[in-house]
Image (tube, grey):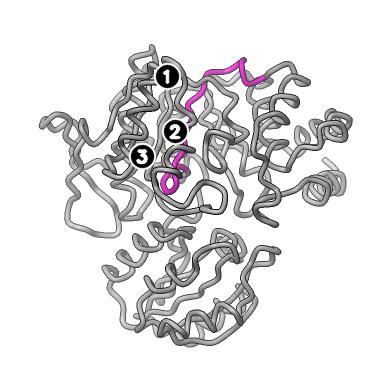
Amino acid sequence: MDTTEYQATLDYLYLHLPMYQRIGAVAYREDLTNTIALCNALGNPQTKFKSVHVAGTNGKGSSSHMIAAVLQNAGYKTGLYTSPHLKEFTERIKIDGQDVSHEFVVDFVKQIKGIISTVQPSFFETTVAMAFDYFASQKVDVAVIEVGLGGRLDSTNVITPLVSLITNIGYDHMDLLGKTLPEIASQKAGIIKPFIPVVISERQKEVESVFIEKAKEEKSTIFFSTDFYQLKEKPRSEDRVYDVYRGGELVFENLECQLKGFYQNRNIPGVLMTLDKLKEQGFSISDEAIRTGLHQVVSLTGLKGRWQKIGDRPLVICDTGHNADGIRAVVEQLQATPHEKLHVVLGTVNDKDIRGILELFPKEAFYYFCQAKIPRALPAGELAVQAMAVGLQGIVIGDVNEAIRSAKANASAEDLIFIGGSTFVVAEVDNL
């Protein structure tokens, strides 16, 4: 189709609708009124397909992609809605790993422009409605729907899924979700629906009672996946390989995951438990479909930016981890990865506890402070000042790709370059 028309449609969405990723909290809507109005106008497409709902602080994107990859591999026409996108808007909405077409995006926006002017939804509310309309029109067998922010008031929370999954709870978006882990967990617990089973990826002492109480209130059966599944990782190499036990019995030997982050061992039990709940509701998912789905999750779904290798000699890794738990996991893996010197291309947004995050980074690394091209980005100079206050040394190079080029110029073949600190820094990497 005419790329000019598609670009004009994207410009309309970006410029006319408040977008949290770009401008922050002022774009966040604290109720579901707009989403309900959009869905009503579209004939409530969210009621026309089966779904799995995934919330959490860290791990919800990876878990959503793993579930979708397995379902796709099991032969189901599988929708996948995630956010934010890294490179292309269409990455948010996929069926069987294929992005929504430019034509659909253009036609959808044309169709609802009148509703947009009446309802005045946010960018996220509009894209959620677009995804639901697309999945309904394409008659998917099932769709995996990732929560955008929180859960209780998130636009995606108008669906009634077959099963809900809640991954790790950590400190993020505290300005909107609460200052304590139980407050944040109570927002995530908002996706627990009456009589719908809910899977919790890991037991966290501070928050498990929040989920238990909410499940009791909704008469929902709750499953803490680590009570059922235990993973033993094989000696660490570049691939993540696990022996998986269920109730002490070996159920998967040498299960490989194409996602290379150490932190995936916290997500996989929740994925397996969620698939069990789907099998109990009539889905035919073989062990082979699970094995192949996890081993080919990146190839099947196109997931980017999760401990992704984008260069050798020097080894270049990028990761979208951006809050304390995410950064802690990344730093652990950096330290376990053989290298001589560590170079870190780092940028963050301006509405996080930056000091707490910076204190997690290794002091022996050399830093290239940069900023993504979004209004929420923390200026690279300010980031450098805060980083130097906690003992990190480096230089300011505002442009992400220039910073990467500088790191490569300074690195030897045995060095390691890491790019991250923000999803939006990773999104600007040229060769991703």
Quarter containing the N terminus: top right
* Towards the viewer: 195 or 301: 195
Q: Earlier in the sequence, mark 3 or mark 2?
A: 2
**Residue drawn 64% across the image and 78% down it:** 398
The local crowd at label 2, few if under 14, some if 14 to 19, many if 20 or more residues have their Cα within 10 Å, is many
Q: Which residue is mark 2?
A: 189
Q: Secondary structure at mark 3?
A: helix
Q: Which residues are magenta?
A: 45-60
Q: Secondary structure at mark 1?
A: loop
Cα–Cα span, label 2 and label 1: 11 Å
Above/below status of 122 relative to 425: above
Q: Secondary structure at mark 2?
A: helix
The local crowd at label 1, few if under 14, some if 14 to 19, many if 20 or more residues have their Cα within 10 Å, is some
Q: Which residue is mark 3?
A: 294
Q: Provide residue 325's location: percent of width, then percent of height.
A: 38, 57
* Towards the viewer: 42 or 409: 42
Q: Provide residue 399's location: percent of width, then percent of height.
A: 64, 76
Q: Is residue 337 left or right of residue 347?
A: left
